[in-house]
Image (tube, rainbow, N blue to C red):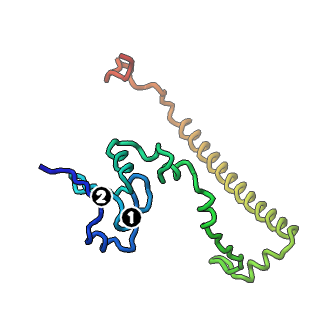
Amino acid sequence: MVLNVCYTVLSFMNFISLRGRTELCRFSGAKIYPGKGIRFVRSDSQVFLFANSKCKRYFHNRLKPSKLTWTAMYRKQHKKDIAAEAVKKRRRTTKKPYSRSIVGATLEVIQKRRTEKPEVRDAAREAALREIKERIKKTKDEKKAKKAELMAKTQKTQGKGNVPKGAAPKGPKLGGGGGKR
């Protein structure tokens, strides 16, 4: 028969192993100093440390620490003690921006682009757009010409062989098409 064991941490060996090391209470989140607190070992060999008998009692009564205002979990969930944490956060040093070359362009080209006037930049953009539009127009014209050529060919072939469209004999439809049931 396996039993749950609960004992106070007072033995000499535990004191030596915990010297200078504080533990945390599994219920309240409070610090437990060496030689203090209650240790509970469950039947599955899991060890729980409690700051005092109050924490142990609440744990065994299955109370949730998040619902008790004095526990660390409640304070964290309800954003208490934020002022103390805000002081601890250090501001990161902001890096100063500096220029360097990119894969496609050297540093000189980038500096030149940066210093050129907006009018020159706009003119270059318009020229590039014009060139792209001309290319698109050219491809559209080529497609139209091909389409007209195909249409002319199909017109000639249709004129030669006058075969009626519905030449196949009409019979009953087979295969039970997908109608409603």
**Residue under label 1:** 23
**Disc 2 packing (10 Å; few <14; some 14–19; many ≥20):** some
x and y percent of residue 107 in the render? Answer: 71, 82
Dot 2: element: strand
Of the pair 39 and 181, the residue shown nearer to us: 39
Q: Is residue 165 above or below residue 38?
A: above
Q: Quadrant of residue 20?
A: bottom left
Judge the density around disc 1: few (<14), some (14-19), many (≥20) Cα neighbours within 10 Å: some
The image quarter containing residue 50 is: bottom left
Q: Which mark is residue 59?
A: none
- In the image, what residue type sits under mark 2? Arg
| Left or right for 21, reference 102 | left
Residue 123 in percent (x, y) is at 84, 66
- Could you tell me the amino acid type at mark 1? Glu
Q: Which residue is painted at 30% across and 74% down in the image?
A: 16
**Residue 175 position in % (x across, y down):** 31, 23
Quadrant containing the C terminus in the rendered view: top left
Query: Mark 1 and 2 residues: CB-CB less than 8 Å, in contact?
Result: no
**Residue at screen point 38% across, 50% down:** 55
Farthest residue toward the left? 1
| First in residue order: circle 1 vs circle 2 | 1
User: Which residue in the structure is indicated by mark 2?
Assistant: 39
In the image, taking residue 26 as reference, residue 90 lies left or right, namely: right
For this rendering, which residue is in front, 45 or 160? 45
> Circle 1 sits in a helix, a strand or a loop, which is it?
strand
- Residue 164 vs 146, above or below: the answer is above
Residue 75 in picture, x, y percent from top left: 53, 51
The answer for how far apart the CA atoms under marks 1 and 2 are is 11 Å
Total number of numbered labels?
Answer: 2
Side (left or right) of 138 relative to 64: right
> Compared with residue 84, is residue 58 higher up or lower down, i.e. above or below?
above
